[in-house]
Image: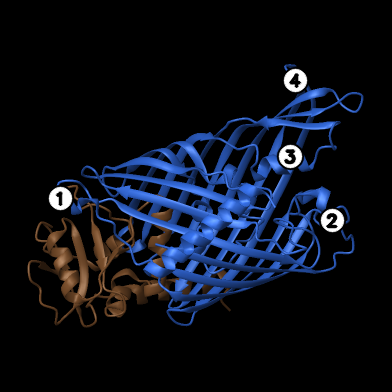
Chain colours: A blue, B brown
């Protein structure tokens, strides 16, 4: 076992034990207890540890044997130093299979000024809004399920999808009795890591070394927006989001004579999402449709003329519902479909269809337990060919069990 | 025979109409720090506060929401449109995405009133029989 992962697991266990012993009731940690002229700073954090076990294939880790490589932890601080000004920062650390690998990083760090209810601006590293869950995709205690519909919110791709370094303009416009509109418009840079899910997916498609090689991800640009129509029906909102990722680039090598040597790939990715959410009494109903296209050229390194062009249209959608019985117990379910290439919708190696049933139990305000089962058809989201050399072409169902616990403060 | 879009439109209209109602908190009152200028709030304005759409009072002071779990859940639902667990999840989502701060929790009404009295911009729903020392009552129109 990797020594670094052992150290992190030990730290996780110790921290969780301390939080349990203290009751994890510290919602407020007032810095102003010494000097009342300072603005209060709020501290919060969480640790989530999961376990995944699949009947067939290794999905989101070495799950055929059972995998504890499913951890998330974050700690944040926020305060309002001046009128209408908000500063927030969060550090994050995670591991999902071979993605993340417990390398902590700055999740968000932003300064925000709200001119009025209609417009505000947020700058720095900001969470990217896209649908119901993108900006909170790794916050286990903010949802019923262990795994979000992975075709829409792939937990391995958070370094690509979760944040941008840039600017986000936001606001809320009242429509009086017709409800209100909430909007965000953002622009900035996406910095992917070489051990993130996107990088791993690219490496997965390469020939084995020494023929194939991966030489790193490039920074790319992102613009986009999220619009929510908060209808006059209490609990019902409808959303549209979309954007454009430009210069999504990476460098690989396909050694001669099998390839041209160094290759620079550069893609553009338009994307769009439609969302609807209805919260009625103890029920929550959600549905989303997500579509994106990856199109671009591949260049022999430093060449101006591309050697190839590719374009792939992908889509995914889900419908789900959850019911909270009481303060402690909640049940949820969803059905989702993912198509990695809409031109091959009957190819079970390109699609993945999943029905999930989740149970959530909150023993205390600061502790969450979840158990979840997935019945899956297709292998479109399996990312690692090396550990999934054989894929069923007859679309037989396979099963995955997911367990997770989260401590928060 | 009406088509499906027409039927859905009628249902939506009925749901909209049924959502329009005056707000009277169930067994509770709305209080604020004395420094808050507002003497009254509309039901919609109160909901915007409890849903995070209104983050600052007119003078720029941050709105600080404080809650008394379990004892005012019904009134909190009336104000926010969310059940207590949904309200908690909603604010956790904002806090952990850098878009807001979770409401402060108090163990009893006296502690909640004392917190609101001492905290600029604070607002809270307390039981109707709570002693309102050092805070102002906000009327809901």
As rendered, which of A230 and B30 lies closer to the eye? B30
Q: Which residue is mark 2?
A: A347
Question: Considering the numbered disc 4 on the image, is that residue within a helix, a strand or a loop?
Answer: loop
Q: CA distance from mark 3 to mark 4?
A: 17 Å
Q: Which mark is residue A36?
A: 1
As rendered, which of A196 and B81 lies closer to the eye? A196
Q: Which residue is mark 3?
A: A202
Characterize the local packing of mark 4: few (<14), some (14-19) or many (20 or more) Cα atoms within 10 angstroms. Answer: some
Residue B137 falls left or right of residue B45: left
- The disc, 2 or 4, on the residue closer to the chain's N-terminal end is 4
Q: CA distance from mark 2 to mark 4?
A: 33 Å
Residue A80 falls left or right of residue A276: left
Question: Considering the numbered disc 2 on the image, is that residue within a helix, a strand or a loop?
Answer: loop
Label tally: 4
**Residue at image point 68% right, 53% down:** A97
Of tags 1 and 3, the one toward the viewer is 1
Label 3: chain?
Answer: A
Of tags 2 and 3, the one toward the viewer is 3
């Amino acid at each position: 076992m990797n020594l670094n992962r052992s150290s992190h697991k030990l730290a996780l266990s110790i921290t969780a034990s301390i939080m349990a012993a203290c009751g994890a009731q510290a919602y407020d940690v007032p810095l102003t207890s010494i000097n009342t002229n300072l603005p209060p700073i709020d501290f919060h954090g969480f640790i989530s540890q999961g376990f995944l076990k699949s009947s067939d294939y290794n999905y989101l880790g070495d799950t055929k044997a059972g995998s504890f490589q499913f951890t998330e932890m974050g700690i944040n601080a926020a305060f309002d130093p001046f009128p209408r000004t908000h500063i927030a920062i969060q550090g994050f650390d995670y591991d999902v299979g071979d993605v993340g690998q417990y390398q902590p990083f700055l999740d968000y760090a932003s300064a925000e000024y709200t001119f009025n209810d209609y417009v505000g601006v947020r700058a720095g590293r900001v969470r990217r809004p896209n649908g119901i869950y993108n900006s909170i995709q790794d916050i286990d205690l903010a949802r019923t399920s262990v795994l979000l519909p992975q075709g829409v919110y792939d937990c391995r791709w958070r370094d690509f999808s979760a944040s941008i370094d840039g600017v986000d303009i936001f606001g809320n416009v009242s429509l009086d009795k017709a409800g209100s509109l909430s909007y965000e418009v953002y622009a900035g840079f996406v910095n992917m890591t070489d051990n993130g899910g996107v990088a791993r997916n690219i490496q997965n498609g390469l020939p084995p070394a020494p023929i194939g090689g991966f030489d790193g991800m490039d920074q790319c640009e992102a613009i986009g927006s999220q619009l929510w129509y908060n209808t006059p029906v209490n609990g019902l909102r409808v959303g549209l989001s979309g954007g454009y990722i430009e210069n999504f680039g990476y460098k690989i090598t396909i050694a001669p004579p099998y390839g041209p040597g160094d290759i620079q790939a550069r893609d553009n990715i338009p994307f769009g999402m439609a969302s609807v959410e209805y919260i009625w009494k103890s029920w929550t109903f959600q549905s989303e449709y997500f579509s994106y296209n990856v199109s671009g050229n591949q260049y022999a390194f430093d060449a101006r003329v591309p050697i190839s062009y590719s374009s792939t249209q992908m889509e995914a959608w889900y419908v789900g519902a959850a019911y909270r019985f009481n303060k402690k117990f909640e049940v949820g379910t969803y059905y989702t479909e993912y198509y990695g290439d809409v031109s091959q919708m009957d190819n079970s190696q390109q699609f993945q269809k999943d029905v999930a049933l989740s149970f959530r139990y909150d023993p205390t305000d600061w502790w969450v337990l979840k158990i979840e089962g997935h019945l899956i058809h297709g292998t479109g989201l399996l990312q690692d060919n090396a550990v999934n050399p054989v894929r069923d072409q007859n679309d037989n169902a396979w099963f995955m069990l997911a367990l997770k616990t989260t401590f928060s403060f | 025979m009406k088509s499906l879009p027409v039927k859905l439109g009628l249902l939506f209209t009925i749901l909209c109409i049924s959502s329009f109602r005056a707000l009277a908190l169930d067994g509770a009152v709305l209080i604020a720090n004395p420094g808050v200028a507002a003497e009254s709030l509309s039901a919609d304005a109160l909901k915007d506060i409890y849903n995070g759409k209104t983050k600052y009072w007119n003078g720029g002071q941050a709105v600080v929401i404080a809650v008394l779990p379990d004892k005012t859940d019904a009134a909190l639902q009336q104000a926010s449109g969310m059940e207590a667990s949904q309200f908690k999840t909603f604010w956790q989502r904002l806090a952990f995405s850098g878009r807001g701060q979770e409401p402060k929790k108090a163990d009893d009404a006296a502690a909640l009133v004392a917190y609101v009295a001492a905290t600029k911009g604070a607002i809270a729903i307390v039981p109707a029989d709570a002693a309102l020392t050092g805070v102002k009552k906000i009327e809901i129109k």
